[in-house]
Image: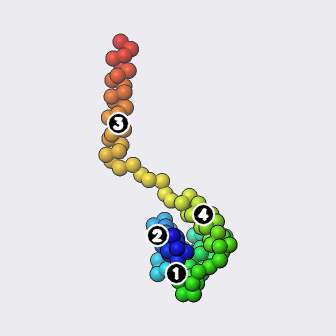
Amino acid sequence: MSQQVELLSLSRDFENLLTEIFGATGQGLHQKVNSVEDQLPPEVTKKLRFIASVRNGVVHKGDVDAATLENIRIRSAEAFHYIEGRRPAKVAAHGDVMLGVIVIAIMAAVLVVAFR
């Protein structure tokens, strides 16, 4: 994967996460970070701004050196870890709950028959 494609994909992933988890608004990673800055720790905000700046530089000026790209990958992993940790727990759907109730009822019936 080229550096440009990798950074565009990474930026898009962060934009989507910020929108989904924090309700970010705006166009592009910089604007989305601005819209939810009060919900993020300063170190995460700084990492996301760095990623957005390097991404913009690559798009407009060309490739970056290997050390910067590795730095982006490290900062991305750290920011991703923080953001994903803020994702609300998924609430079970009604069908999932009913399936669980049915499975428990069947297990109870099996135990009653087995211990008669």
Q: Amino acid at mark 1?
A: Gln
Query: Looking at the picture, which amino acid does disc 2 mark?
Result: Asn
**How far is disc 1 from disc 2 in space, using C-alphas?**
12 Å
Secondary structure found at label 4: helix
Separation of residues labelled 3 and 1 (CA atoms): 46 Å
User: Which residue is under mark 2?
Assistant: 16
- Crowding around mark 1 (Cα neighbors within 10 Å: few <14, some 14 to 19, many 20+) is some
Element type where label 3 sits in the image: helix
Q: Position of residue 95 (x, y in %)?
A: 31, 46
Of the numbered discs in the image, which one, if any, rests on residue 76? none
Binning the other alpha carbons within 10 Å of mark 2 as few (below 14), some (14 to 19) or many (20 upward) gives some
Q: CA distance from mark 4 to mark 2?
A: 15 Å
Q: Mark 1: which secondary structure?
A: helix
> Please, is residue 96 above or below residue 64 in the view?
above
Specify whether residue 106 is in view: yes
Numbered mark located on residue 77 in the image: 4
Lower sequence index among marks 1 and 4: 1
Where is residue 109 shown, x and y percent of the image? 33, 23
**Which image quarter: residue 70?**
bottom right
Task: Give the mark toward the camera: 3 or 2.
Answer: 2
Disc nearer the start of the sequence (3/1)? 1
Residue assigned mark 3: 101
Residue 63 image point, x, y percent: 59, 80
